[in-house]
Amino acid sequence: MTHAQLKAFHAVAQSAGFSRAAEKLSLTQPAVSDHIAKLELTCGTQLFVRTRREAVLTEFGRRLFALTERLFETEGQIEELISRARKLEEGSLAIGADAAVHVLPLISSFRERYPGVAVKLIGGNSAALLERVDRFEIDFAVVSIQPAEARYEMLLLREDRLVALISKQAPVRLKSLEMASLATCPVVLREEGSMTRTLLLDEMARRKLKLSNVTEIDSREAVSEAVAQGLGIGIVSESEVVPDTRLRQIPFADWAVTMREWLVWLGARTDLKLVAAFLDIARRQKVVRNDRNERREAR
């Protein structure tokens, strides 16, 4: 039994004739008759009673026709879905981000251009999100790690300096913070896998310093709240600081470091329509942002 045989059977049953079915399928009448004969041989029973004017379904033929109606209706739905997906009128895109604020403008532009595509935004630290990219659980990861593995491709989205976040209720009104002083203060850090944590601890180790009092928290929003509640000093990317009357940010006096945010995806998936469409918007927005930055610097 082949798909072509079932298609010929379905057309004959709908048309009640071999010549009409052949015309509908753009086949010769002998070709349609051959398909039916082979299908009847496979079934071991007659499918049609032939008369001069029409082909009438047998009882077994009626039962088979009821099934092929469902089969070809589903096939039509599949073809329609694929067609809509090709036009980006259907589908879904999953994006993981360490800081949602950095990717929301991209998602907004994408949804405006492709309103029929569902977008899911997933949180997590950089290391965990790259693992989810590898497992095909998400299409993109917006992370602060630049992976070295050849299977990844990436686009630099932004670059910001790290700053200290402190409570306005802190007794000392600092204008800047030295690393040696930070080592003696309570500090609020992100969990393992966070790039802000890695950068800070690596710099502390390089200077042979060690943090004396650390509170570990697993989300950026919770770090800000912990700092506001007086649990310690937070280390954050400057662009991630959300306006809060309870907080203020100060620069480091003796540590100049920037944190980059990369859009990362599996290179093997670059040509997928949804992936390519999102990348096109990301590249366009990056060009616009760079142009604006250059104009600011020129002033």
Image: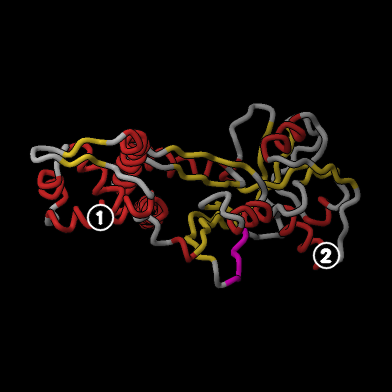
* Residue 223: mark: none
How far from the left and from the top, in percent, is residue 244?
A: 63, 29
How far from the left and from the top, in percent, is residue 120?
A: 51, 39
Task: In the displayed orientation, state which residue is furthest to the top.
Answer: 245
Q: Amino acid at mark 1?
A: His
Is residue 24 rendered to the left or right of residue 118?
left
Residue at (58% x, 49% y) in the render = 137
134 or 244, nearer to the observer: 134
Q: Is residue 93 magenta?
A: no
* Residue 35: mark: 1
Looking at the rendered structure, the secondary structure element under dot 2 is helix
How far from the left and from the top, in percent, is residue 168?
A: 72, 31
> Gap between marks 1 and 2, in whole Å?
77 Å
Q: Answer above or below: position of 99 versus 230.
A: below
Q: Answer above or below: position of 6 versus 147.
A: above
Q: Amino acid at mark 2?
A: Ala
Residue at (81% x, 50% y) in the render = 182
Q: Answer above or below: position of 202 versus 48.
A: below
Q: Which residue is mark 2?
A: 205
Task: In the displayed orientation, state which residue is furthest to the right.
Answer: 212
Prevailing SS of the magenta stretch:
loop
Q: Answer above or below: position of 77 versus 154.
A: above
Looking at the rendered structure, the secondary structure element under dot 1 is helix
- Could you say which quadrant of the image residue 291 lies in? bottom left
Query: Earlier along the polypeptide chain: callout 1 or callout 2?
Result: 1
Q: Which residues are magenta?
A: 145-149
